[in-house]
């Protein structure tokens, strides 16, 4: 599952005003938030918790102009709590994103 590095990077750079250290900090915060919400999805056993975590992921994707993340969050919203397939796809998204930045 690929992330769209151009739009996401442009959003980070615009938010940081060209400050490279701030770009790195924002990127780290993005990844930390992704991992937290994915963990909440993984542990969800009821519709309420699952939907809250999926909506937070959707909001994160929308905020950072990541169509892939929005689509994955929508897939989670359409699925059942604890659906392992979408959790794996989200984990692959994070892994690909983090590997692109070392």
Image (tube, rainbow, N blue to C red):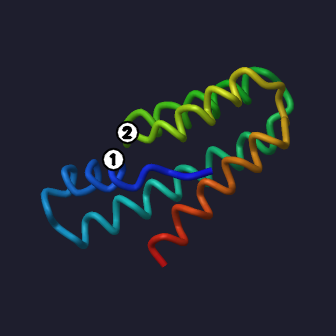
Tell me the residue at 25%/72% (across/down). Answer: 21
Corner quadrant of residue 9 = bottom left
Residue 54 or residue 95, whichever sits in front: 95
Which residue is label 2 attached to? 65
Looking at this rendering, what residue extends furthest in the bottom direction? Answer: 102
Where is residue 91 shown, x and y percent of the image?
Answer: 69, 54
Q: Secondary structure at mark 1?
A: helix
Q: Secondary structure at mark 2?
A: loop
Q: Residues within 10 Å of mark 2 (few under 14, many from 20)?
A: many
Corner quadrant of residue 13 = bottom left
N-terminal of the pair, mark 2 or mark 1, is: 1
Tell me the residue at 37%/37% (across/down). Answer: 63
Q: Is residue 11 left or right of residue 100?
A: left
Is residue 9 shown above or below 75? below
Q: Is residue 67 left or right of residue 76?
A: left
Quote the CA–CA distance across marks 2 and 1: 6 Å
Tell me the residue at 53%/32% (across/down). Answer: 58
Looking at this rendering, what residue extends furthest in the left direction? Answer: 17
Residue 72 or residue 43, whichever sits in front: 72
Which residue is label 1 attached to? 7
Corner quadrant of residue 44 = top right
Evaluate if marks 2 and 1 touch, with contact meaning CB atoms under 8 Å apart. Answer: yes
């Amino acid at each position: 599952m690929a992330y769209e590095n151009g739009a996401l990077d442009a959003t980070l750079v615009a938010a940081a005003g060209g400050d490279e250290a701030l770009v790195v900090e924002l990127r780290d915060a993005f990844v930390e938030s992704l991992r937290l919400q994915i963990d909440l999805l993984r542990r969800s056993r009821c519709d309420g918790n699952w939907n809250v975590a999926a909506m937070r992921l959707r909001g994160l994707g929308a905020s950072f102009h990541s169509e892939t993340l929005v689509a994955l969050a929508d897939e989670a919203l359409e699925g059942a709590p604890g659906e392992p397939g979408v959790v794996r796809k989200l984990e692959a998204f994070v892994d690909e994103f983090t590997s692109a930045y070392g």
